[in-house]
Image (cartoon, rainbow, N blue to C red):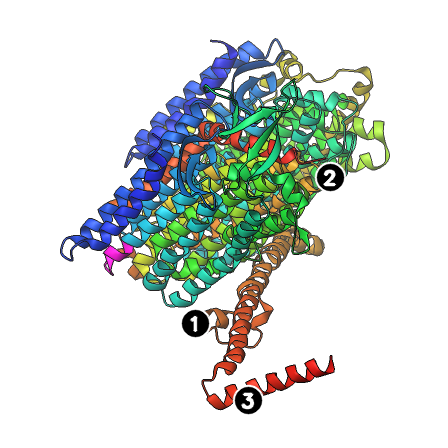
C-alpha cells in the first residue's frame, strides 16, 4: 500500500469502529474493548509499516486529497499528508491507544458505564490521528476541535458524580491538607465544561491565525491556501501585499503564528490556560493516560512544530517564555500536591512547558527536533506513569492521597518497577529516554540563549529550574507511594498488581523508558532532521553536564528528604514545608490562578456581564414577570431596550388618549373647539 | 412544471381552508394529517430544486411562472427560485412538517390550529418563491396574522402581550416598505424606463430577439457589449434591480430614493433577523409560544429577514449595500456578542435558546455584509443550518417542559440517567449550536468568519471580535446541558421521566441526521447556494465607481 493510502486507513479505522460500537445498542464492555483494541492494534501495525516507508527517506508524502468547500475566491479541502514526524506521532498514538484500551478492560471491570469507553476512546483517537495526518491547517483545526469533543466526553465519563463538596466519597478519601481546589466546582460534569470552554478560548485565537493565513494566501494568489506547502510559500514570501489588522510583512506572519500558538496554549494547557488539566483528573485515569500523555496535550506542541515555518523570531520568543513560565510554575505546584494524579497532571503541564521552551529556541538551534523528541519520549513514559497510577488507585480502593499510601512496592512489585523506570526517565536519569530528550531541550535552549543573548537566557534558566524540580517531585511521588511503611493499612491491604493483560500493557511500555530504543543508530535525530553544526556541539556538551548535575541534585535531595531522613524518623518534608512556608502555601493554592480564573472568567466576565446585559436588554426580573398587554409602567423600565420599546408604545397610547379628548362626544366640547378655532382663523386672516 | 412553485403556496392555503371546514368528529385527527400533507409539498419541491441546483449550479431562476395580477399597476404572480429560494423552501417544508409532528396531540381547537399553521406556511412560501415586490410585501404582512393568533391563543401566560408585541413590532418595521413600494411606482415613468444593461445579462437562447428577463434588448453598439432594455413600470424584482441607477438619482423626503429604500428594507428585515436593538420581541414571542410555534418561528420566520436582504435589499440598492456594509458588520457583531452574553445568564432554558437564535443570526448578517463570496454563501448556509439546529433545541426544550412543567435550569439535574437518548440528542444540538466541526453549525460560521477575514477595511477586526462568540456559545450551551443532563439526579420525582417517545423521536431524529450530514458533507448545499450569492455580489460590486 502506498503511504497515503496507509495513512488514510489508519485515520479512518478508528472512526469506523466508533460508528460501529456507538450504533450497537447495549454493547457489552468486553466485546467493545476487544474490538477496539484489535482495531487499534491493526492501526499500530499499519503505522509501523508507514514509518518504515516514510521515516528513512525523510521526505513528506502527499496522500489522497479532495475539495470540501469551493468558495470561488479560495477552496478548502481534506486530505492526507505524511512526513517522518507525523508518521512517528501516529505510531506512538496508536501504540499508546492500544495499550491503554487493553489496560482499561481490567481497570473498568465491573463498571456499569464501561461499555461507553471504547467508542468514545476511538472517536478521540480518530480525531487525534486526523490532526497528525491532515494535509492542511483547516482540516487540522476541524480535527482539533473533535479532539476537544473526545476529551469532553472522556473527562465527563462518570457524568453522574456530584461536585466534590457534596461527595462523601471524595471527602473521605481526600488528603487532610488538601487545599487550593474549588470543591463546589469540581466534578466530571464541571471539569468537562471547563476543559471545553478553556480550549475554546485558545481556539478563538486559532481562528484568528487561520483568518490571517487565509488572507495572506489569497493575497498571494493561492487557490487553496492553508495547505502545508502553501503555508511554507507564505512564510518564504518576502513581501505580503497589504496588511491584516494593522500588521504587515513579518508582523502579519507573527500574528498568524501567535494565533496558532494561542490554540496550542489552550490545548496543551500552558499558562494561563492550564487550569483545565488538573481538573480533568476527574475523568478515568486511563483517559488521562491518553489525553494527558500522548494525545490531546501533545497536539498543541505538534501543531506548532508542524507550522514551524510561520514562526518568526518574535513569535518564537513568546513561545519560549510561555513555556518557561509554565514549566517552573507547574513544577512548583507539583512539589506540594498530595493527590497523586494532581502531581502527574502538573508534571505534564511542566513537561509541555519544556517542549515549548525547546520549540522557542528555533530550528537552527535544534529546537524543533528537541521539542518533538521530548514529546515522543514524554508520551511514552507519562502514559506508563498514568497507567501505574491507575493500578495504584485501583489497588487502594479509590484512594489517591499520598499521605495514606506507602510501602506498596511489596504488594505491587511490577507496578513499582515500571513506575520507577518511568520516574527515572522523567527525572532525566542517565541511560533513560528522558535524559536524552531533556538534554536536547537544554542544549537547544542554551544554544539559543548564547546566540540571541539577553532575555533569551530566561527560558533556559527556567528550563533548568523546572528540570531540577522535576527530579525532586517525581521521586517524592514514587517514594511516597512505594517505599516506607504503609501509612494507612485500611487503604492498602488489598493492593495487588494488575492482572494479565493489564500487566502486559505495562510491560510493553516499560522498555521505551530506556534510552536505547531512541538513540540506536541516531535514527530519531535523523528522522527529525536535528542539526549537527559544530557551533551546537559546545552547547550540547555544556547542556549534558548541566542536565547531569540537575538530575543528581534533584534526586539526591528527594531521596534524602523523602526516604532516608523519614526512615530515621525525621519528618524532613514538614520541616522544609514550614521553612519555605510562603512558597508552600502559594504552590498549594495553585498560585491563585484557578481562583483568578473563577473570579475574572466565570464570575465577572461570564455571569456578571451576562446579568448586566440581561437587565439592559429585558429589564429587571420583576418587570419580566409582570408583563401584560397594557404594559403597565414601572420605575426604571426605560433603562432597558425592551422597556424603552414598551415605553414608546405607551407614549403612542398616551398620545392617542390626548387626541381622543377631541372626540369626547359632548356637543358643548365640539362647539367650544369650533368657536376657538374659528376665532383664531378669523384673527389670523384679519391680521394678514 | 411551471405550476410547482405556485402549488407550494396554493396547496397549503386550500388544505388550511379544508381543515377549517372539517366536521367536529374526525376533524381534529384529520386536520393534522392535512397539515403534514401541506408541508410535504414545499419540502419535496424545495429538495428537488436544491438537488437540481447542486447538480447543475447556476445563478438563474428556475421553475419560472408568471400570471398577471393587475396590468394597471404592473403587479403579477411571478414565481421562481434560485439556489437560495430552493434551500429556504425545503427548510420551510421540513420545519413545518416537524412542527406538525410536534403538535400532533394538540387538543385545543386543533382544526383552527393546523389551519393557521397551513396559512402561515402558505404566506412564508409566498415570500420565498415570489419575484414580485408587491406580492412579496403582501405575503410578508399576511404571515403576521396567523402567527399573532397562534401565539395569542395557544401560548403561555403572557401570550397576549407577546403576540401583540410581535405583531406591532414587525408591522411597524415593514410600514416603510409600503411607502417604498408606492415611491418606486411613483418615480417610474408610466411607459417604462430605458436602462443600459451589460452583456452578461442578455440571453439569446430562444427564437426571437435577445432578451433580458423576458424584456427585449437592443444592442447599443456594434460590439454588443452594452444593450438597451425598456423596463416597464412593474414590481418585478429583477426589473427593479436593473433600474438601480435611476433610484440613486431620484430624491424622496430629502434623501435619494435609493437611500430611503435601503433604509426601509433594512428596517423591515432587521426586525425579523432579528438584529440588536430591534430584537426584543423575540424572547417574549418564543417563551410564550407553544413548542411547535417556537419551532416555526425560529426555523423559518427568522430566515425571512435574511432572505429579504438577499432577495430585495441587496439587489435593488447595491450602492447602499456597499457603502453601509461595514456599519452592518458592526451591527452584526454586536448582535452576535450581545445575544450570546444575555443567553449566558438566562435561567429559563427557552429564553436561553431564543437569545442563542439572536446570536446565531448575527453570523448571517456578518457574512452578507462582508461582500465576499465565502461570507455571503456562509450567511445563507448559516440560515439553513441554524433553522435545523435551533428547531432541534426548541423541540428538546419542549420535551423537557412536557415532562417537568417548568423550564428553570436550576430545577433540573442528572436527567441523563432516566432519559439517556434525550441527553445525547441534547448534547448534539448544543454542540451544533456551539459550532463544532462535523456538525452543521460550523460550516456557516466558518464561512462567514473567513469572509470577514478575507474582506477589506474593518472586516478582519469585526471577524476577530466575533470569534469571541465561539467561547461564549460553548459556555452557555454546554452549561445548559450540564444543568439539565449531568450531575446527580437532583429531584427524585424526575427519575420517573420517560425518555423520548416514538413521536418525539420522529420529530428530532431527521434533524439530527441532517445536522450531521450537512456538517460532514456540506458540498452540495454550498454548490447550490454559491452561484446565486456570487451573482448577487457581482451585481453589488458593479455599483462601485
- The residue labelled by disc 3 is A672
* SS at circle 2: loop
Asked whether A261 or A435 is in front, the reply is A261
> Relative to the observer, which residue lies in front, B163 or B7?
B7
Residue B437: % across, % down: 50, 35
- Circle 2 crowding by C-alpha within 10 Å: few under 14, some 14–19, many from 20: some
Judge whether B91 appears above or below B151 on screen. above
Q: Height in image: B512 above or below A431?
A: below
Residue appearing at x 46%, y 32% in the figure? B83
Which stretch is magenta? B107-114
- Residue A20 as seen in the image, left or right of residue A669: left
Label disc, if present, on residue A628 of the rendered structure? 1
SS at mark 1 in the image: loop
Query: Quarter-wise, where is residue B224 in the image?
Result: top right
Q: Sequence-wise, which precedes: disc 1 or disc 2?
A: 2
**Residue located beneath label 2 in the image:** A245
Q: Answer with left or right where residue A304 lies relative to residue A29.
A: right
Residue B112 counted in the magenta span: yes
Amino acid at each position: 500500500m502506498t503511504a497515503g493510502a496507509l495513512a488514510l486507513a489508519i485515520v479512518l479505522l478508528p472512526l469506523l469502529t466508533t460508528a460501529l460500537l456507538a450504533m450497537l445498542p447495549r454493547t457489552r464492555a468486553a466485546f467493545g474493548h476487544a474490538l477496539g483494541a484489535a482495531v487499534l492494534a491493526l492501526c499500530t501495525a499499519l503505522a509501523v509499516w508507514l514509518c518504515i516507508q516514510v521515516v528513512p527517506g525523510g521526505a513528506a508524502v502527499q496522500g489522497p486529497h479532495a475539495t470540501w468547500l469551493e468558495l470561488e475566491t479560495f477552496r478548502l479541502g481534506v486530505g492526507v499528508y505524511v512526513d517522518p514526524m507525523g508518521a512517528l506521532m501516529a505510531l506512538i498514538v496508536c501504540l499508546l491507544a492500544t495499550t491503554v484500551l487493553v489496560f482499561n478492560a481490567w481497570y473498568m471491570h465491573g463498571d456499569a458505564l464501561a461499555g461507553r469507553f471504547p467508542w468514545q476512546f476511538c472517536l478521540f483517537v480518530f480525531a487525534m490521528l486526523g490532526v497528525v495526518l491532515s494535509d492542511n491547517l483547516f482540516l487540522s483545526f476541524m480535527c482539533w476541535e473533535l479532539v476537544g469533543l473526545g476529551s469532553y466526553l472522556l473527562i465527563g465519563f462518570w457524568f453522574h458524580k456530584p461536585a466534590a463538596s457534596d461527595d462523601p466519597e471524595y471527602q473521605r478519601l481526600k488528603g487532610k491538607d488538601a487545599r487550593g481546589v474549588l470543591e463546589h466546582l469540581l466534578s466530571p460534569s464541571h471539569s468537562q465544561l471547563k476543559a471545553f470552554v478553556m480550549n475554546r478560548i485558545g481556539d478563538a485565537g486559532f481562528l484568528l491565525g487561520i483568518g490571517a493565513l487565509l488572507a495572506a494566501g489569497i493575497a498571494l494568489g493561492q487557490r487553496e491556501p492553508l495547505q502545508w506547502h502553501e503555508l511554507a510559500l507564505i512564510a518564504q514570501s518576502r513581501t505580503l501585499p497589504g496588511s491584516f489588522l494593522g500588521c504587515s510583512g513579518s508582523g502579519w506572519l507573527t500574528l498568524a503564528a501567535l494565533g496558532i500558538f494561542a490554540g496550542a496554549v489552550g490545548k496543551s494547557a500552558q499558562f494561563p490556560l492550564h487550569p483545565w488539566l488538573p481538573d480533568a483528573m476527574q475523568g478515568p485515569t486511563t483517559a488521562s493516560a491518553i489525553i494527558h500523555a500522548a494525545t490531546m496535550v501533545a497536539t498543541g506542541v505538534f501543531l506548532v512544530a508542524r507550522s514551524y515555518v510561520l514562526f518568526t523570531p518574535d513569535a518564537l520568543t513568546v513561545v519560549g517564555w510561555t513555556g518557561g513560565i509554565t514549566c517552573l510554575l507547574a513544577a512548583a505546584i507539583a512539589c506540594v500536591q498530595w493527590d497523586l494524579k494532581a502531581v502527574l497532571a502538573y508534571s505534564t503541564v511542566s513537561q509541555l512547558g519544556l517542549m515549548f521552551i525547546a520549540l522557542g529556541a528555533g530550528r537552527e538551534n535544534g529546537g524543533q527536533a528537541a521539542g518533538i523528541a521530548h514529546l515522543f519520549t514524554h508520551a511514552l513514559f507519562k502514559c506508563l506513569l498514568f497507567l501505574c497510577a491507575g493500578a495504584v488507585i485501583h489497588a487502594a480502593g479509590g484512594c489517591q492521597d499520598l499521605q495514606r499510601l506507602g510501602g506498596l512496592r511489596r504488594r505491587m512489585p511490577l507496578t513499582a518497577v515500571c513506575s520507577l523506570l518511568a520516574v527515572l526517565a522523567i527525572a532525566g536519569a542517565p541511560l533513560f529516554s528522558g535524559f536524552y530528550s531533556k538534554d536536547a531541550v537544554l542544549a537547544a535552549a542554551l544554544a539559543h540563549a548564547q546566540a540571541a543573548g539577553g532575555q533569551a537566557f530566561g527560558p533556559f534558566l527556567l528550563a533548568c529550574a523546572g528540570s531540577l524540580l522535576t527530579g525532586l517531585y517525581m521521586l517524592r511521588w514514587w517514594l511516597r507511594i512505594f517505599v516506607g511503611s504503609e501509612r494507612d493499612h485500611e487503604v492498602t491491604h488489598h493492593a495487588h498488581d494488575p492482572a494479565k493483560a493489564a500487566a502486559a500493557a505495562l510491560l510493553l511500555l516499560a522498555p521505551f523508558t530506556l534510552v536505547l530504543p531512541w538513540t540506536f543508530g541516531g535514527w530519531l535525530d535523523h528522522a527529525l532532521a536535528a542539526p549537527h553544526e559544530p557551533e551546537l556541539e559546545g552547547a550540547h556538551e555544556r547542556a549534558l553536564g548541566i542536565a547531569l548535575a540537575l538530575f543528581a541534585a534533584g534526586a539526591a535531595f528527594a531521596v534524602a528528604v523523602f526516604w532516608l531522613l523519614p526512615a530515621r524518623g525525621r519528618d524532613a518534608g514538614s520541616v522544609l514545608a514550614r521553612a519555605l512556608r510562603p512558597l508552600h502555601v502559594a504552590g498549594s493554592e495553585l498560585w491563585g490562578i484557578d481562583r483568578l480564573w473563577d473570579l475574572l472568567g466565570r464570575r465577572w466576565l461570564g455571569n456578571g456581564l451576562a446579568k448586566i446585559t440581561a437587565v439592559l436588554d429585558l429589564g429587571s426580573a420583576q418587570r419580566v414577570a409582570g408583563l401584560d398587554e397594557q404594559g403597565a409602567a414601572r420605575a426604571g423600565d426605560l433603562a432597558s431596550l425592551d422597556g424603552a420599546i414598551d415605553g414608546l408604545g405607551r407614549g403612542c397610547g398616551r398620545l392617542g388618549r390626548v387626541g381622543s379628548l377631541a372626540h369626547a362626544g359632548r356637543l358643548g366640547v365640539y362647539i367650544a373647539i369650533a368657536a376657538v378655532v374659528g376665532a383664531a382663523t378669523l384673527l389670523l386672516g384679519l391680521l394678514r | 412544471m411551471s405550476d410547482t412553485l405556485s402549488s407550494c403556496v396554493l396547496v397549503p392555503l386550500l388544505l388550511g381552508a379544508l381543515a377549517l371546514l372539517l366536521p367536529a368528529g374526525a376533524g381534529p385527527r384529520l386536520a393534522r394529517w392535512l397539515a403534514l400533507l401541506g408541508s410535504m409539498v414545499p419540502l419535496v419541491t424545495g429538495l428537488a430544486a436544491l438537488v437540481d441546483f447542486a447538480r447543475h449550479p447556476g445563478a438563474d431562476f428556475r421553475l419560472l411562472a408568471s400570471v398577471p395580477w393587475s396590468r394597471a399597476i404592473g403587479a403579477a404572480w411571478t414565481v421562481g427560485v434560485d439556489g437560495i429560494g430552493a434551500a429556504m423552501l425545503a427548510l420551510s417544508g421540513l420545519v413545518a412538517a416537524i412542527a406538525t409532528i410536534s403538535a400532533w396531540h394538540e387538543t385545543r381547537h386543533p382544526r383552527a390550529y393546523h389551519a393557521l399553521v397551513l396559512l402561515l406556511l402558505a404566506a412564508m412560501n409566498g415570500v420565498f418563491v415570489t419575484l414580485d415586490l408587491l406580492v412579496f410585501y403582501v405575503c410578508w404582512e399576511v404571515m403576521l396574522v396567523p402567527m399573532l393568533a397562534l401565539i395569542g391563543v395557544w401560548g403561555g401566560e403572557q401570550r397576549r402581550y407577546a403576540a401583540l408585541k410581535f405583531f406591532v413590532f414587525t408591522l411597524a418595521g415593514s410600514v416603510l416598505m409600503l411607502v417604498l413600494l408606492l415611491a418606486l411606482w411613483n418615480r417610474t415613468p408610466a411607459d417604462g424606463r430605458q436602462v443600459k444593461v451589460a452583456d452578461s445579462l442578455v440571453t439569446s437562447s430562444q427564437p426571437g430577439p435577445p432578451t433580458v428577463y423576458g424584456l427585449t434588448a437592443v444592442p447599443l453598439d456594434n460590439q454588443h457589449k452594452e444593450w438597451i432594455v425598456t423596463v416597464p413600470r412593474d414590481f418585478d424584482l429583477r426589473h427593479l434591480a436593473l433600474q438601480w441607477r435611476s433610484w440613486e438619482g431620484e430624491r424622496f423626503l430629502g434623501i435619494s430614493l435609493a437611500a430611503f429604500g435601503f433604509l426601509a428594507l433594512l428596517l423591515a428585515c432587521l426586525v425579523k433577523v432579528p438584529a440588536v436593538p430591534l430584537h426584543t420581541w423575540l424572547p417574549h414571542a418564543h417563551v410564550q409560544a407553544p413548542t411547535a410555534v417556537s419551532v416555526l418561528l425560529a426555523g423559518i420566520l427568522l430566515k425571512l429577514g435574511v432572505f429579504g436582504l438577499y432577495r430585495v435589499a441587496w439587489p435593488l440598492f447595491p450602492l447602499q449595500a456597499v457603502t453601509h456594509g461595514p456599519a452592518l458588520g458592526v451591527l452584526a457583531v454586536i448582535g452576535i456578542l450581545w445575544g450570546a452574553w444575555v443567553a449566558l445568564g438566562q435561567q429559563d432554558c427557552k429564553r436561553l435558546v431564543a437569545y442563542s437564535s439572536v446570536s446565531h443570526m448575527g453570523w448571517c448578517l456578518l457574512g452578507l455584509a462582508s461582500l465576499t463570496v465565502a461570507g455571503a454563501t456562509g450567511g445563507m448556509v448559516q440560515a439553513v443550518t441554524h433553522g435545523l439546529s435551533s428547531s432541534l433545541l426548541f423541540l428538546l426544550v419542549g420535551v423537557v417542559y412536557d415532562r417537568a412543567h417548568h423550564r428553570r435550569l436550576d430545577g433540573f439535574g442528572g436527567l441523563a440517567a432516566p432519559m439517556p437518548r434525550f441527553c445525547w440528542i441534547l448534547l448534539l444540538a448544543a454542540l451544533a449550536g456551539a459550532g463544532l466541526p462535523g456538525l452543521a453549525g460550523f460550516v456557516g460560521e466558518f464561512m462567514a468568519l473567513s469572509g470577514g477575514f478575507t474582506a477589506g477595511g474593518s472586516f478582519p477586526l469585526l471577524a476577530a471580535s466575533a470569534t469571541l462568540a465561539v467561547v461564549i456559545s460553548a459556555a452557555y450551551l454546554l452549561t445548559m446541558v450540564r444543568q439539565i443532563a449531568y450531575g446527580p439526579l437532583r429531584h427524585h420525582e424526575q427519575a420517573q421521566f420517560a425518555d423520548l417517545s416514538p413521536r418525539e423521536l420522529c420529530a428530532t431524529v431527521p434533524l439530527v441526521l441532517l445536522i450531521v450530514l450537512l456538517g460532514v458533507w456540506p458540498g452540495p448545499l454550498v454548490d447550490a447556494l454559491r452561484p446565486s450569492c456570487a451573482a448577487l455580489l457581482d451585481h453589488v460590486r458593479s455599483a462601485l465607481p
